[in-house]
Image: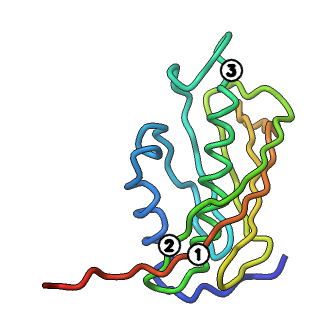
Amino acid sequence: MTTQQAPNPDFAVVVPAAVLSMPAAAHLGFHFGSVEAGAVEIVQPYRTELTQHDGYFQGGVLGSLADFAAGSAAGTLLPVGWVNMTIDYTVKILAPAKGPTVIARGRVIKPGALLTIAAAEVFSVADSDETLCATALVTMRNVRLVKPEVV
């Protein structure tokens, strides 16, 4: 995989700050494990309210983590003053996620001016063992922020 070039030199601070300011991210309670140009890792600690039967993480939670990871990876390649929003994603659940931690690793597949295509893999982690639980393909719409006019 080739190293991506980030047009915003502050991406490693800007992207986590923007993502963690979202109410949905605050509800999930995850944090960033790593932030690189074109790739991020999100770490989700076990929380009872995110589970279903017998302590397994609920499938929608895995999809949300994949979306956040892929979108965050895409965000690392945006210029200053730009954000992105999910317009489409497909998640395939491959195995149940159970354990003290779930990690979602997002990466950019194809950056673009208008759309960025990214992917994510979600792993259940127990001790040092990782089990691939879900994979996702995500399309992000890149949007330039417009400052409101001062009247």
Query: Circle 3 — which element?
Result: loop
Q: Residues within 10 Å of mark 1 (few under 14, many from 20)?
A: many
Q: Amino acid at mark 1?
A: Asn
| Residue that numbered label 2 is attached to | 83
Q: Would you place residue 84 above or below residue 130 in this image?
A: below
User: Secondary structure under badge 2?
Assistant: strand
Q: Position of residue 93 (x, y in %)?
A: 82, 35
66 left or right, relative to 33: right
| Residue at image coords 73%, 53% | 89
Whether 72 is drawn above or below 56: the answer is below
Left or right: where does residue 119 sit relative to residue 6? Answer: right
Three-letter amino acid code of the residue under disc 2: Val
> Alpha-carbon distance for marks 2 and 3?
33 Å
Binning the other alpha carbons within 10 Å of mark 3 as few (below 14), some (14 to 19) or many (20 upward) gives: some
In front: mark 3 or mark 1?
A: 1
Residue 142's mark?
Answer: 1
Q: Residue furthest top?
A: 54
Tell how many labels. 3
Which quarter of the figure has residue 151? bottom left
Q: Are marks 1 and 2 in contact (CB under 8 Å)?
A: yes
Sequence-first tag of 2 and 3: 3
Judge left or right: residue 86 versus residue 97: left
Q: Measured from the top left, where is residue 109 in percent x and y?
A: 80, 71
Q: Where is residue 144 drawn, in percent x and y?
A: 48, 81
In the rendered view, tell whether residue 41 sits above or below residue 79. above
At 50% from the left and 73% from the top, the residue drawn is: 83
Query: Which residue corresponds to mark 3?
Result: 56
